Image: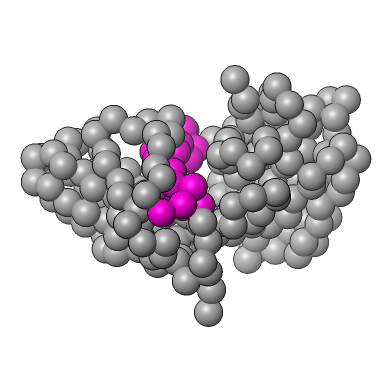
Amino acid sequence: GDSVTQMEGPVTLSEEAFLTINCTYTATGYPSLFWYVQYPGEGLQLLLKATKADDKGSNKGFEATYRKETTSFHLEKGSVQVSDSAVYFCALLIGNEKLTFGTGTRLTIIP
Amino acid sequence: EAQVTQNPRYLITVTGKKLTVTCSQNMNHEYMSWYRQDPGLGLRQIYYSMNVEVTDKGDVPEGYKVSRKEKRNFPLILESPSPNQTSLYFCASRKEGQGPYEQFFGPGTRLTVL
C-alpha cells in the first residue's frame, strides 16, 4: 500500500540554521505530495504542496521539490526562526482519495 | 472566516460512557473525515464521508461510528469508549471532485478515557 516515511525526530536547531526534514514515499500511482505543519495546541495547516514530478512547492521560506526518481519530497528552509518550532507532517494523496501521513517530525528552534 | 470547528476541545471520560465529538465546517465542503493522532503513528483516518448520507471506513474504524445527516456536520460517536481510544482527534474537510484540494483541519479534541 501507499506509505510515507519521515525523518525521525525530534530535531533541535539553533536560530538561523539550515533545515532539512527528509520524506520519502511509496505509492502505486502518481501522488500529489504535501507538507503540513502543526503548531502547539492547533490543528494541521497546509504548508506547501506539489502535484507532479519536478514541481517545487514553497511557502513562508520553506521549499520542497517533488523528486520522482528518488521518490522524495524533502522539506528545506535556509534560515529557521523560533516561530518555526512545530510538528511537520509529510503526506501523499492519490487521485482524490484519503491523505496518507508520515509519523511527523517535531522541530524545536533554540534562540 | 472559513473554518472547521470541533467540540469539545478536551474531554475526560470513563470506560463505557457513550460520547459524541461534534465537527462542523462552514465551507460547503462535500468531503469530511476524522483522524486520530498518536505518538509515533502520525495521523490515521477513522471514517470519512464523500457527501450527505455517504460514509465509509478508514484505516482504524473499530469502536467508532459517524453520521452525515447534514453537509456541514460530521459527528464522531464512541458508543462504549475504552482506554485505547485515548488520543488526539482531528476533523477535516475539503471539496470533492477533481483536485487535489486542500484539506482543512479542526483544532483537535484531546480525549482521555479512564
Q: Nearer the viewer, residue A47 or B73?
A: B73
Residue B45 sits inside the magenta stretch = yes
Q: Residue B69: in sight, yes or no? A: yes
Q: Nearer the viewer, residue B113 or B34?
A: B34
Q: Quadrant of residue A69?
A: top right
| Left or right of A96 in this view: B107 | left
Q: Where residue B19 appears, x then y in whole percent?
A: 17, 51
Q: Quadrant of residue A71?
A: top right
Residue B25 vertical placement versus B60 (above, below): below
| Left or right of B54 in this view: B2 | right
Q: Residue furthest bottom?
A: B1
Q: Where residue B49 appears, x then y in whole percent?
A: 44, 46
Q: Quadrant of the C terminus of chain B?
A: top left
Q: Which residues are magenta?
A: B31-52
Q: Where residue A7 appears, x then y in whole percent?
A: 65, 33
Residue A6 sits inside the magenta stretch = no
Q: Residue B9: in sight, yes or no? A: no
Magenta stretch: dominant SS? Answer: strand
Q: Quadrant of residue A21?
A: top right
Q: Residue at x 34, y 33 (%)?
A: B61
Q: Residue furthest front?
A: B53
Residue A23 vertical placement versus B95 (above, below): above
Q: Nearer the viewer, residue A51 or A103?
A: A51
Q: Residue at x 74, y 59 (%)?
A: A80
Q: Residue at x 73, y 26 (%)?
A: A29
